[in-house]
Amino acid sequence: MTDLRSNMTSYEFITSGLPRQPDESVWKYRIRKLFTVKSMKSIDEDHKTSELKRSLNVFDLIMIGIGGIIGNGIFVLAGQAAATRSGPAVVISILLAGITASFAALSYSELATMIPISGSSYTYTYATLGELIAWIIGWDLTLEYLVGSAAVAVGWSGYFKFFFLDAFGIEFSSSWTEAPFIYNSTTSTFETVPGAYFNVPAFCIVVLLTILLVLGIKESARYASFVVSIKLIVIFLFIIVAGSRVNPENFQPFIPPNQGSFPSFGVTGVLAGSTVVFFAYIGFDSLSTIAQESKNPQRDLPIAIMGSFSVVSIIYVAVCIVLTGVVSYVKLDNPAPLSVAVDAIGFRWLAIMVDLGAVIGLTSVILVTLMGQPRIFFAMANDGLFPKFASKVHPRFGTPYVVTIMGGAIASLGAAFLPIDVLAELMSVGTLLAFFLVNIGVTILRYTAPDAPRKFKVPGGPFLIPLLGAALNILLIATASVATIIRLFGWMAIGLILYVFYGIKRSRVNNQEKCIEKATT
């Protein structure tokens, strides 16, 4: 038996309590299996035996991180949050969202050095809170990345239209450039848009980037680096040129008085605005999904996560100050608020540059979110919780091509038919749930795996930053609309049904007896 066990994969002896104990009831045993954790040893073995191509250096990771973060949040949603929730105090909203996200970034950095394999917070949760919670977060992350890529594609389509209008005077028909549905938050119902049928630009950009991701991760990283450079140049131009025309009168009132409902201005509006603009910081977590494709993840991932996050945070504050300073916040409820601000000060050449920069720059965000989702399914399939086809790696390109194509197909249809506000808030709430569990996971691992190597540690011990970050995550989730929370729990319910009828029966961690029987035959 000893020889047999030594020759088997790392999944056999992940936790000490399996199989069922003599004095243990059936239900107690089944419940205990739901919270079985993967050992650090098995996770390390997964990293060593991965078939994914390790080709990304620290520069690639930083550029992917910046490319994934700077997108719809600042190009689209900051203006909408200012116009409908926060007013000029959107600067406070962006800071509060940034503080909340920074705690998660620190926690991700610590866990990334301990668990350097694909799967992001799914894998981290599996090592801390057990299989059931890991499934929930993995399913949640799938929603985050699929919805996120679709939401950014819708924003990309808006700037695509503005670019042709500003540069060439060509106005595209809404019949093929807008989603056929909008969401009425007053009646909590979807309504059809007369004359709109299919968002072709949003659909096509997702399809094209999906093909690029199938061709190879290194090729995708090179493209991301090129795109990020252009995006940063355009944003700096906006800050410098438009910043010279800031009118202090536009900052009055800094926090507009509440208009009778929780999210409509006032202090509560600033909090609600934080939930909306939290979307702006989503992206750095995608780095942890490509850990197995990094040359030196223990060293490079913390540098890339914190480096990209720090650069972006400074840029966001500057953009929000300039955006609300050059034009009244009431005019910013527009798919392209930066273009509105530039038009208000009369710089047509800058408007064209901003439109072009957004069109080029938002492609990197779509690319990164599309990159993250297949690697979640890949990790879940390796654990037996998802069908085997999800773990197939292309023999030539070294990418998880089957789930990449699947994810791209779903995201492209979402981008073609759904409005950006529904997609964006759903992604924000899903990500906040993931960040909550990652923060909790850091505290748990400090006690369950105190001697595990950590090349980076969250400062201040295992309680202060992780638990404060978790509390802020819950606070921002509570400010989301009821409809969004219902959609999230509906998606979670579908995932739990799949887990009960498929995942739990095929889990490698919880079916060790079957693994042993299979190995002996």
Image (tube, helix red, strand yellow):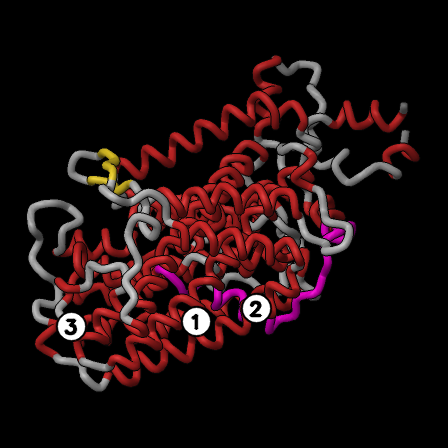
Which region shows up in magenta?
47-72
**Comparing labels 2 and 1, the label whose residue is closer to the camera:** 2
The residue to which callout 3 is attached is 327
Q: Say what secondary structure mark 3 lies in.
A: loop
Q: Are marks 3 and 1 in contact (CB under 8 Å)?
A: no
In the rendered structure, does residue 68 fall within the stretch colored magenta? yes
Residue 374, label in figure: none
Q: Residue at x 63, y 55 (%)?
A: 114
Circle nearer the N terminus (3, 1): 1
The residue to which callout 2 is attached is 223
Q: Are marks 2 and 1 in contact (CB under 8 Å)?
A: no
Q: Residue at x 20, y 40 (%)?
A: 185
Residue type at numbered disc 3: Val
Between the C-alphas of marks 2 and 1, the distance is 22 Å
Q: Residue at x 7, y 50 (%)?
A: 259
Residue type at numbered disc 2: Tyr
The residue to which callout 1 is attached is 310
Q: Say what secondary structure mark 2 lies in.
A: helix
